[in-house]
Image (tube, rainbow, N blue to C red):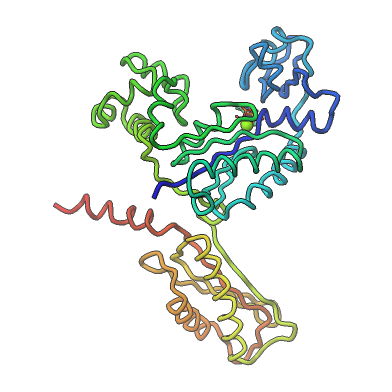
Amino acid sequence: MTRIIFHCDLDCFFAAVESLYNPQFLNLPIIVGADPKRGKGRGVVSTCSYEARKFGLRSGMSISKAYELCPHGIFLRPDFDKYSYISKRVMKILKQYSNKFEQAGLDEAYLDVSDHCSDMNDARILAKEIKKKVFSEIGITISIGCASTKSLAKIASDHKKPNGITIVPPKYRIQFLKNMDITRIPGIGRKSRIFYSKKGISTIGDLLSLSVEEIERLFGKSGSWAWKVSKGLDDRKVQEREGLNKSISKERTFSNDMGDLNVLYSKLNELNIKIHDKLERKDLYYRTITLKIRFEGYITQTRSQTLAFPSRNLKESFNILMKLLKKSKNPLKKVRLIGLKYSNITQKINNMQQSLTPFLTKTP
Ligand code: TTP
Ligand code: MG
């Protein structure tokens, strides 16, 4: 089934927030970055409004050059508290449209909306609705790209900035990409462009005219990544970052220190079911199970077990927890708090592939 993925990216984010707080700056060339010191300043432009971009200003440009090109611009120092406050509010809105949500930066996020849209027409309607909601509730504009992979959606969101929607149905992928500069592929920067152009490759179309073997021979891994992106072969999932490489835990403090083993068992069971529901919703697996017990007198003990393979099995985990509890329980001491933690979190498929690869390559 073709996936439908959105990449949502706020327009000239820091500058947009500045004009939100200072409406008198609206539609003026705003430059957020270092102090220009009347053209003698050091440092760079973080971003600038689209009005400033008309004068040739860009993110990363030296602030003195920006001053030279646009001396009448409104030059402001960054205020990250404001940006992260607005970012949080926008992300809260975006999350409402799919539980497959992944924040990729302060001003960008992916949404997998495959379960909510039957085709690209539906996707366009949804994208319009999201834009309308962000604008009416926050007051800034967002551009949305929609495609069957994360990387193509990201290229698409940049296509009609500011305030645009770009939908790339799979059958129009090549038409959409072929004349684009290869630097539009995430990960191919201006330095790589020089290298690619020396070998006669400047557009994505040029890249696609060669086989992946040839590309890999000429440009190594970065080349084959770029080729796969252009072919629509990026199968990375949209996932909540918070779940990965971190842990999921729950704990309960008893109002009275607890000596009854049955109560401890049932509390542990209850917490374990809740955690497994969450893991299932996020489609995550774990390898390490940790039991935490705090006894009366604030003595805390943790015991863990690490499994050979990623797992998400309620019964198996409960048996392990029971075993850990029996080992930890001190019959002379009452329990104040009980908790469990799942760590070494992965998405099973990736992890299995990683663990199989070395094995397979070693096999004669
Ligand atoms: P971007 O999304 O790359 O840029 P933008 O939102 O300003 O403009 P666009 O409309 O093209 O999306 O980056 C988001 C914010 O990150 C940007 O507002 C400021 C900050 N940033 C820097 O501080 N330095 C940089 O070099 C870039 C590219 C961004
Ligand atoms: Mg942006």
Give 321 or 168, whichever is nearer the viewer. Answer: 168
Ligand 1 falls in which quarter? Answer: top right
As displayed, is residue 122 above or below residue 14?
A: below
Residue 293: x %, y % from top left: 61, 78
Q: Residue furthest top?
A: 68
Give 223 or 9, whichever is nearer the viewer. Answer: 9
Give 284 or 123, whichever is nearer the viewer. Answer: 123
Residue 133: x %, y % from top left: 70, 43
Residue 125: x %, y % from top left: 59, 42
Query: Which residue is found at the position 58% from the left and 86% from the top?
Result: 266
Instruction: Answer with left or right where residue 164 lies relative to residue 224.
Output: right
Residue 295: x %, y % from top left: 65, 81
As displayed, is residue 41 above or below residue 119?
A: above
Question: To which quarter of the image does residue 144 belong?
Answer: top right
Question: To which quarter of the image does residue 39 belong?
Answer: top right
Query: Which residue is found at the position 77% from the left and 26% from the top?
Result: 77
Instruction: Answer with left or right where residue 173 lies relative to residue 280.
Output: left
Query: Which residue is found at the position 26% from the left and 25% from the top?
Result: 210
Instruction: Answer with left or right where residue 24 lies relative to residue 266.
Output: right
As displayed, is residue 67 above or below residue 143?
A: above
Query: Which residue is found at the position 55% from the left and 66% from the top?
Result: 278
Q: Residue furthest left?
A: 364
Question: To which quarter of the image does residue 33 belong?
Answer: top right
As displayed, is residue 311 above or below residue 116?
A: below
In the rendered picture of this protein, how many numbered marks are placed on residues? Answer: 0
